[in-house]
Image: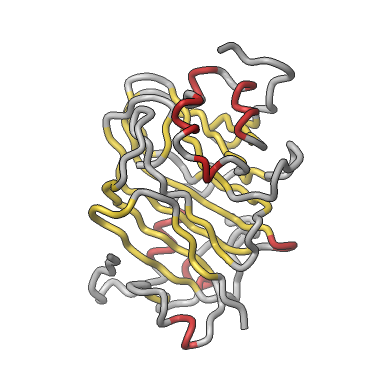
Amino acid sequence: MCIFSGPVAEVAGTKIFARGSAQGNQFLVYSMRYAAADALAMILPLPTPAHPPEDALRFVDFSGYGEFFDDLDNCFAKTRSRDFGAEEPSGSLLTVYSVGSFEASFVPHRQDFARLDSRFRLPDSTWDTLPQYADYSFAVFKLKPGAQSVHPMAFEFPRCHPDQLFFPTLHIHQGVVEESAHFDHALYWQATYTREQRIHIHGSRSADYRVTKMVDIARAQGVVAQDTPLYRLHLSGMYENGDLTIPEGGV
């Protein structure tokens, strides 16, 4: 589960990929299965520098690479055991991008949600309980009703902490923020670590095969680096409700 603008009957199989990119930016790819009776939006908070321009985020169309996360999983030998770890819009409307089967928008600041259709935003009272997001930006993906297994949602955004990889894992259920939440997440990332840095990421596992052996680099459109190590962490069960960050390292 993540942040949705309306009720969802089920969310499962969340998979997120992160990698640092040029000029301190970060790539993020997100995928999950869901079921909802009505059209709604998935909202991903992003720790960007305060008040970025409206074109600061770049969406990447992954509709032609639906098996992206399957290929990432193939980088890990199957014989190993499973990992585990512990009002109406005002002003000009935000740009709506066509990204494969999605319509998506970049919301530079919380106040800009007023420029989206009311179906695709949360009430101010919910954001008032989350002051840590006061200076965040948001990627918003409009989702169709029904039971859906969607192709990966991908984009590149500027980050305010270039030494950290950010994973949007906060859960909001029908406008309510609980202290803990059930996670069914597989996190993937690329980074370069010293041995000392590596052992501090508890429960993570490094890939057994190079990404160039299993991943279609051309269809990944620059999101995946050819020579950077790949890691994976599974989170399944009840965890403190919030986003996760992982040090990017760098040697």
Taking the view exactly as shown, the residue that stands out farthest to the bottom is: 195
- Who's the residue at 68% across and 15% down the image? 90
Taking the view exactly as shown, the residue that stands out farthest to the top is: 88
Is 15 on the left-hand or right-hand side of 222? left
Quadrant location of the C terminus? bottom right
In percent of width and height, residue 188 lies at: 45, 63
Vertically, is 179 above or below 35?
below
- Dividing the picture into quarters, in which one does residue 203 lie? bottom left
- Who's the residue at 48% across and 19% down the image? 119
- Who's the residue at 26% across and 76% down the image? 80
Is 138 on the left-hand or right-hand side of 2? right
In percent of width and height, residue 226 lies at: 60, 72
Vertically, is 148 above or below 6?
below
In percent of width and height, residue 86 lies at: 28, 65
| Viewer-proximal residue among 35 and 210 | 35
| Viewer-proximal residue among 231 and 149 | 231
Quadrant location of the N terminus? top left
Numbered circles on residues, count:
0
| Viewer-proximal residue among 188 and 3 | 3
In percent of width and height, residue 154 lies at: 56, 47
- Dividing the picture into quarters, in which one does residue 248 lie? bottom right
How is the rendered protein coloured? secondary structure
- Who's the residue at 54% across and 62% down the image? 165
